[in-house]
Image (cartoon, rainbow, N blue to C red):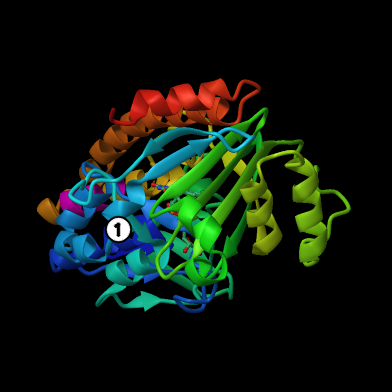
């Protein structure tokens, strides 16, 4: 008999998990809090690595479609100093499949495909160990029971509480996101600077990244060390007040950085939180975690990749041995923890170097990881 499997969360982790199970004709219930796929802006672009996000898509039978949609040219990267001097300029090779970019919205739609997601089903609580399995209690008070509940509900996971007392803590680094549209026609100078990929500027305890998405859209990330309450008194609905506060933070930086901030719209505040590196939990039959719910780490280009790879591997293992659900989940958790701890250490050390009192550290980090 096939088990009743639910995944909570329709982000990269949950959708990849569900899509790989679907690929193996295994039923799965996807429970997502958002009322619809486009209920909120999907966020910026993601680079999917060959042995991680792309491997996960291959396990779902979606690699060819990804290759048609993704942007290998988005791997281009330029680094400036705060005076505007170009320090590094890595063009992208069109045949380089190492980690092409894809818009999050495009990735979501690719993964959604034929999946029958239950939208608007926010989970409030998960209670393991009831006579009939794991009880899922929804925000609207309804209840349902499953044999396995997979928590893929992100940083502030409700499912995590059923297995672990861990909660995310602030890294000391905040990110403010903004974006520009139609850059090639409206801001051609900035469009040329960002090129097909990204431009980054590193200063003392501050960083600035502008990244091209598809359709002439550019996402801008201002990152800086600050106490959690740095914005006390700032009204996030007042874009001009936020802009002016960012312009003060980046005062004296090269003109294009200030131009990006001048033209950016819709500022989003994202203080960076992380779970403890090497977060594990005592195995609880019937409940497990995937993605940011399990291993929230600084955004250094691996979180979604790990989320998708974990989702694909768990789904594949369940489909291969449907009668051994608990053993399968136990073995998967061991692998997940070991891999997440390795990447978590790297991402944590990386963030410290990217937003550092010594901007030379950021450059040195790129020199270590970029192909020469
Ligand atoms: C600025 C930024 C840039 C990044 N860039 C990259 C990158 O280039 N490459 C990369 O690999 N990673 C990147 N990351 C990290 C990446 O975004 C995350 O690691 C990834 O989204 C995690 O996927 P997830 O599915 O685990 O969680 P999420 O993407 O957070 O998805 C969780 C889902 O669960 C739903 N949900 C939440 N609570 C409930 C509930 N109670 N009930 C039901 N549903 C619920 C949410 O609505 C959401 O749809 C970046 C992160 C940031 C902040």
Placement of 185 over or under 124, stated as above or below = below
Of residues 145 and 170, the one drawn nearer to the viewer in this rendering: 170
> In terms of secondary structure, where does tag 1 sit?
loop
Residue drawn at point x = 39 percent, y = 62 percent: 103
Instruction: Decide if ligand 1 comes within 8 Å of the CB at mark 1.
Output: no
In the rendered image, is residue 115 in sight?
Answer: yes
Assess whether residue 143 is covered by the magenta stretch. Answer: no
Q: Quadrant of the N terminus?
A: bottom left
From the viewer's perspective, tell me whether residue 158 is left or right of residue 105. right
Number of numbered discs: 1
Residue 149 visible (yes or no): no
Residue closest to the far right: 233
The x and y percentages for residue 37 are 44, 75
Q: Which residue is mark 1?
A: 71
In the image, 7 versus 80, the foreground residue is 80
Quarter of image, res 280: top left
The quarter of the displayed image where residue 344 is located: top left
Q: Residue at x 64, y 35 (%)?
A: 83
Residue drawn where x is 24% and y is 77% of the image: 114
* Image location (x, y in percent) of residue 170: 65, 37
Taking the magenta stretch, the answer to whether it contains residue 313 is yes
Q: In what quadrant of the picture does the C terminus appear?
A: top left
Magenta residues, as a range?
310-318
Give coordinates of residue 333: x percent, y percent.
Answer: 31, 38
Image height of 291 relative to 350, above or below: below
- Residue 224 in the image: above or below residue 183: above
Relative to 318, 372 lies left or right: right
Q: Decide whether the magenta segment is chiefly helix, strand or loop.
A: helix
Residue 270 percent location from the top left of the image: 63, 50
């Amino acid at each position: 008999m096939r088990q009743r499997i639910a995944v909570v969360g329709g982000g990269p982790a949950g959708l990849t998990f569900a899509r790989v199970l679907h690929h193996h004709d295994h039923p799965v219930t996807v429970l997502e809090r958002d009322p619809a796929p486009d209920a909120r802006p999907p966020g910026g672009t993601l680079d999917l690595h060959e042995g991680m996000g792309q491997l996960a898509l291959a396990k779902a039978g979606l690699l060819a479609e990804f290759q048609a949609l993704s942007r290998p040219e988005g791997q281009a990267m330029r680094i400036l100093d705060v005076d505007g001097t170009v320090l590094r300029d890595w063009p992208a090779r069109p045949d380089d499949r190492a980690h092409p970019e894809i818009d999050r919205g495009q990735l979501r739609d690719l993964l959604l495909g034929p999946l029958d997601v239950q939208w608007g089903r926010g989970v409030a609580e998960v209670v393991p160990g009831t006579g009939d399995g794991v009880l899922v209690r929804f925000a609207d008070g309804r209840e349902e029971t499953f044999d396995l509940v997979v928590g893929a509900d992100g940083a502030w996971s409700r499912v995590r509480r059923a297995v672990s007392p861990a909660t995310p803590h602030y890294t000391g680094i905040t990110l403010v996101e903004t974006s520009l549209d139609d850059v090639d026609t409206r801001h051609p100078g900035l469009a040329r600077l960002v090129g097909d990929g990204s431009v980054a500027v590193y200063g003392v305890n501050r960083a600035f990244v502008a990244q091209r998405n598809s359709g002439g859209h550019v996402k801008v990330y201002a990152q800086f060390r600050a106490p959690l309450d740095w914005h006390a008194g700032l009204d996030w609905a007042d874009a001009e007040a936020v802009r002016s506060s960012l312009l003060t933070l980046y005062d004296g930086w090269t003109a294009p950085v200030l131009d990006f901030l001048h033209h950016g719209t819709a500022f989003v505040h994202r203080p960076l939180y992380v779970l403890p590196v090497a977060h594990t939990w005592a195995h609880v039959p019937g409940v497990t975690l995937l993605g940011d719910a399990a291993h929230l780490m600084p955004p250094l280009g691996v979180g979604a990749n790990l989320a998708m790879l974990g989702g694909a591997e768990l789904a594949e293992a369940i489909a291969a041995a449907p009668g051994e659900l608990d053993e399968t989940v136990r073995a998967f958790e061991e692998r997940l923890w070991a891999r997440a701890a390795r990447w978590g250490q790297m991402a944590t050390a990386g963030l410290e170097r990217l937003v550092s009192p010594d901007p030379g550290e950021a450059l040195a980090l790129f020199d270590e990881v970029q192909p020469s």
